[in-house]
Structure formats: structure tokens, C-alpha cells
Image (cartoon, rainbow, N blue to C red):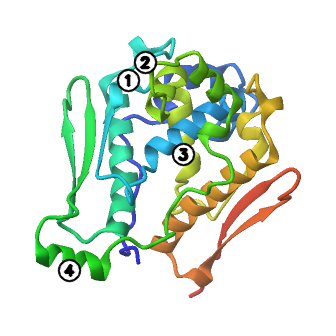
Amino acid sequence: MLKKRHYKLPTQYVLEQLPQFIAFREANPTRKVDELSAMVMFGRAINWLSCLEILWQPFDRENFCLQFVSHIVYNDPLNTHLPIEFFRQIGLSLEMFWTLQLENLYPEGLWWIEWEGWDYDIAIQATIERHQTLSANLELGKKGVIKGALRLPNLYALRDLPEFQEFQLYNPHNEIDESQTAIMFGRAIHWLAMLNILWPDFEQKNNYQVWVKYLVWNDPRKAELSQAFYQQLALTLKMFWALQLESLRSIEEWVIRIDGWEDEIVISAEIMERRG
């Protein structure tokens, strides 16, 4: 089981500091502009799927993961205007999500996360040592991988996306994965908005609702997406929201609902007010 520890997103550089978001808000003075409206405007399916695979690595199968944080928005037209705090924000967010997953999979001492280049060209890596000692292996046998726990849904993966399949065809001599895809298509505004949607501040919010199809409303290739893609996003949001709410409140004090499974999917979380 997860430790009852509450994880919070870092605040090195938040969505409201991004010049692109500020300009978007100023251009819409009569509208509520937040992470959801930013995603409606700028979200793309290929960004969602590649970013999620970077955030939630297959640590139950892989012993090592290295991510060059400075590369994930390499092709963002505004890349050169991003301060180092943005890359620290992404690195710290990766560290949070990786730690959350690794703590659930392995006993303390069998894994670690390391940083390189805090002030320039940031990289973050996770290492799992499955065969340290006999005693460690015995401990792993008692408290090791929780099979089927905390995995991303598998209704629709990055490799199912036609846009990704074309990207693979155009690069036949390279093994294309989520990192290369993020380098090609990643945008800073998407990363920051996505993190806020995956991990709402439930310490401050009593309810939160997402119309899932709106998350890629302006994706130029939206017509290629099947209902399974939206179901994938809904189940992914449910997983992350539940992880946070379980650390904040008892299970009787909150509920997550998914409505319109075969149509316009809406996912909502509600936290009951404490009495007395």
C-alpha cells in the first residue's frame, strides 16, 4: 500500500508565469482562463500520450530510466524564452511521480533518483537494484512489485495513435519512443497545464470536473481519435486523482465519477465537507 504521504506539485515555475499563458489570458479578459481552457486551446493527443509515458515509467519491468529534461520542449517555438525554473519544475514533477510509483513497487533502499545539471541542461534518472544482496532479495519477495497496481490503463497507448505511427515511419532507422515524441511535439504550455489537471490542488478544491474530449478540442487530427483514447484519459485522471485523495482523506470522504463512457465523457471528483 502507498504510504500516507501527501505529494504536492513543485512551484518553481507554474502555468500562470508562462508568457504564452499570460497572453492567452489577456486575450480573453471576459472568460475564466485556467489549465482546462489552456488545454482546450493547445492540447494535442500526441502530447498527452507521450508526456504520460514519461511521467509514469514501467518501473515494474525496467531497472533504469534517464530523462533529459531540457530536451522535452526542444521544438517549442518559445523554447529559448523559458527560464531554468521551468525545467526545474518539470524535473521536480518527474521526481514526484516517479517517487510515488517506486515507493509503491519496492522497499526503500532498492531504488534511487539522481539529478544532473540543476543550473543547466537538467537530466534526471531513476535506478532500481533488484539483485543487491540475498537479504534484499528476500525483502523484495515480501514487499516487492504489486502486480497490476498503479499502472496506466491500456485501452489506448501512444503506439496506437496514427500520428505516432506516421512519425515512426518517417524515422525507420531510429527506435522512436515517448522521449523522442516529446522532443518533437512537446510544448511548455501543455506540460504545465497537464500537470495541473493530473494533480489538482485537492487541499484547496472541494470539486473538480473535466470534459475529457475538450482536452484535445483543437487537435488538428482529432477526427482520427477513437472513443478508447478518451476512455484512456478518463481512467488515467481517475488513477492520479485517487492517488492524491487517498493521501488526503479517508475513502468515505471523497468520490470520483465517470459519466458518458460511450459518449461525451465527464470525470468529476467531489470531496465532502468535514463536519464538526
Viewer-side residue, 31 vs 242: 242
Residue 229 picture location, percent across and down: 72, 45
CA distance for labels 4 and 2: 43 Å
Q: How many marks?
A: 4
Circle 4: residue type:
Leu
In the figure, is residue 137 to the left or right of 209?
left
Task: Report if the CB atoms under discs 4 and 2 are less than 8 Å apart.
Answer: no
Residue hosting label 2: 74
- Res. 71 mark: 1
- Image depth: mark 3 or mark 4 in front: 4
Cα–Cα gap, marks 4 and 1: 39 Å
Which amino acid is tagged 3? Asn
Nearer mark to the viewer, of 4 and 2: 4
Residue at 25% x, 23% y: name it.
121
Within 10 angstroms of label 2, few (less than 14), some, or many (20 or more) residues? Answer: some
Callout 2 amino acid: Tyr
Q: Gap between marks 3 and 1, in whole Å?
A: 21 Å
For residue 32, above or below residue 257: above
Disc 4 + disc 1, Cβ < 8 Å: no
Can you identify the residue that label 3 sits on? 196
Q: Nearer the viewer, residue 134 or 273?
A: 134
